[in-house]
Image: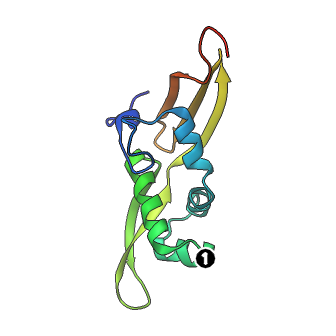
Amino acid sequence: MKSAVSLKSVTTEVSENEESYNPIMISNLISDKYVSKILMSTYKKPKSVQNISAHYGIPIAVCYRKVRQLEKLGFMNCVGDKLNGNGKRVKLYQSQIVNAHFFMEKGKFRARVQLSSGIVDDFGGSCSLMDENGP
């Protein structure tokens, strides 16, 4: 299945030199200590960036940056907003990842991410860690 916006062509702040995501970059992003906390904390219930930052000890600027990266990839969505204790409206974000798999297939590292919308996106196929002629 393909999404309306191809996740592979999205360029974000993970690497300024890369034009697209490869499976290693996706693996590194999802396994990042802050990103994994953000995704797990918003899997069942949407939360504000401020709530995630305070609860998990993630610096607020880092938390906003990571949420933006995940949102650009479609791995996280803003699902609403609410008033906080100060009467300020804050956005609520929720993880869209149902599962993510990282694996080797025919000598190539691959990543497969299934979103809650049912979209399954594969990253890989052209990313080989070894030269075809040997080490």
Q: Is residue 48 visible?
A: no
The quarter of the image holding the C terminus is top right
Q: Position of residue 84 (x, y in %)?
A: 42, 84
Query: Which of the two residues, 92 or 49, is positioned nearer the viewer here?
Result: 49
Q: Which residue is mark 1?
A: 55
As drawn, 56 above or below 105: below
Query: Which of the two residues, 104 or 84, is positioned nearer the viewer here?
Result: 104
Q: Is residue 44 visible?
A: yes
Q: What amino acid type is highlighted by mark number 1?
A: His
Which residue is depicted at the point 66% across and 11% down?
Answer: 134
Q: Position of residue 51 (x, y in %)?
A: 52, 76
**Which SS class for mark 1?**
helix
Query: Which of the two residues, 125 or 41, is positioned nearer the viewer here?
Result: 125
Mark 1, other Cα within 10 Å: few <14 / some 14–19 / many ≥20: few
Q: Is residue 133 left or right of residue 125?
A: right
Please, which residue is most extreme toward the front here?
135
Q: Position of residue 126 (x, y in %)?
A: 49, 20
